[in-house]
Image (tube, grey):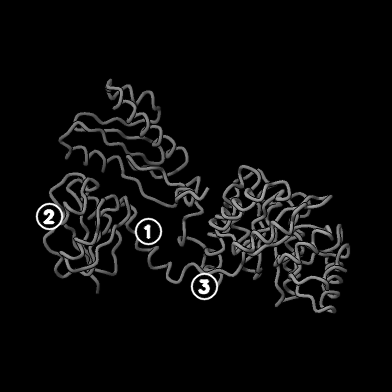
Amino acid sequence: MPRYLFVTGRLAAKALGEVLERMAPEWEYEIAVLPISVAALMDTRFIARHLKSAQGCDLVLIPGLCQGDLSPLVDALGVPVVRGPKDLKDIPAFFGRERSREGYGEYRVKILAEIVDAYALSLDEVLARAEYYRKCGADIIDLGCPVEGRFEGVEQVVRALKERGFQVSLDTFNPEDILLADRAGIDYLLSVNSRNIELAPRLSCKVVVIPDFDQGLESLERNIARLEAWNVPYIIDPILNPIGFGFTESICRFYETRRRHPDAEMLIGVGNLTELTDADSTGINAVMAGIIAELGIDYVLTTEVISWARGAVRELDRARRLMHYAVQNHILPKMLDDSLITVKDPPHEHYSEQELREMQRLIRDANFRIFADDQNIYVFNRDLFVKGTDLSEIFAQLGVDEASHAFYLGRELQKAALAVRLGKKYLQEQDLRWGYLSEDETW
């Protein structure tokens, strides 16, 4: 049975012990309390000076906020050393997530990211947008074309993208642009139906076949039959409609198409939902990725035009991994990857008022500690314990006149208030968590 050594400071020792006791883990553990009040103020050099041995332990966990290189600790102790979560209350979730994510990250569906109105952009602008999408996780760059008229210079744009290693699709019904782009090396054409299907045998790229406009599945079946008679490779897109314009019926079309064509490649465009619904795109993309995984859809087309759809490609990249893993393993897509929980927060525990008052009794300095739960903000030092919800009232009780200190407290109290309002976890001097948006920016 493995044995873990948890390193902490004096103030957190009691709470850490209680958390581990409630976990009743399958492994053994011990706690090393080092001579410091606040564990987060330790760095690895301090730990190396005061933690002399980890004998009998298989792993050492230090607080997640501890700074410094872990290598000297590993060398001195002779066992692996890892950083735990930033808050000891998250230790149960930390261990649960590490177990459940084994093998996580594979996916089936490829993402097509559309550069809307690419025809109106300069070549440098198109290339910059393509690089952004690639960093976000896109597999294919889709070039948006005018509804009427030509995409002047389309062949030069396609060649430039291909030279930089991109797979490229073109979104148009214009026959001249289609032929020029095909000669330049596009990989996919969106789309063909009876209006332009006669072009298909002349093309080298794979075509996306759709129903005839304002027609149903039978027109799609006719178009598929013609492509098969010509031995033209194709991808089927039954077309997803916006909510209020046949959305539920269109989901049924996708289901029926998969039933009729169990081995065919399929594409779905989700922009009719993410761009045309007054809701953050994160949850929409997660649910649609679940449908995509269950139906075995091979391609998903998305856009990032309206403000609330910014980041849609990154969201789909995470959602496709989450849903693929859940569907393949027949488990719920829950407690596997919290990067799509952005505005709100994953489950977390708060310190009770009793725990905070016990913590206050151990404090010997005048520095303010700030905590928050789902209803209140708490501010305390050795002399004062303030609880409330109104920032002005809380601040007035602190007796702070010095400008920089007042600015610091104001900033922290505002973060704490936002955490209470949104149900987020607040940690003093740490940014609030925003899921994948908290990661390194790619734009």
Is residue 290 visible to us here? no
| Residue 394 on image: x %, y % | 34, 26
Give the residue type that dot 1 points to: Ala
Q: Nearer the viewer, residue 242 or 179?
A: 179
Q: Return the disc, 3 or 2, that comes first in the chain's sequence.
A: 2
User: Where, by quadrant of the figure, is residue 24 drawn?
Assistant: bottom left
| Residue 400 on image: x %, y % | 27, 23
Q: CA distance from mark 1 to mark 3?
A: 20 Å
Q: Quick check: 262 above or below 63?
A: below
How crowded is the residue under tag 1: few (<14 C-alpha within 10 Å), some, or many (20+)?
Answer: some
Assess whether mark 1 and mark 2 are in contact (beta carbons under 8 angstroms): no
Horizontal arrangement in the rendering, residue 5 relative to residue 426 (left or right): left
| Residue 115 on image: x %, y % | 67, 52
Q: Which residue is mark 1?
A: 93
- The dot on residue 336 is none
Q: Quadrant of the N terminus?
A: bottom left
Q: CA distance from mark 3 to mark 2?
A: 46 Å
How crowded is the residue under tag 2: few (<14 C-alpha within 10 Å), some, or many (20+)?
Answer: few
Q: Return the disc, 1 or 3, that comes first in the chain's sequence.
A: 1
Q: Return the disc, 2 or 1, that comes first in the chain's sequence.
A: 2
The residue located at (68%, 46%) in the rendering is 277
Q: Nearer the viewer, residue 5 or 80?
A: 80
Q: Secondary structure at mark 1?
A: helix
Give the residue type that dot 2 points to: Arg
Q: Quick check: 391 above or below 326?
A: above
Q: Which residue is mark 2?
A: 49
Q: Which residue is mark 3?
A: 329
Q: CA distance from mark 2 to mark 1?
A: 30 Å
Horizontal arrangement in the rendering, residue 370 relative to residue 232 (left or right): left
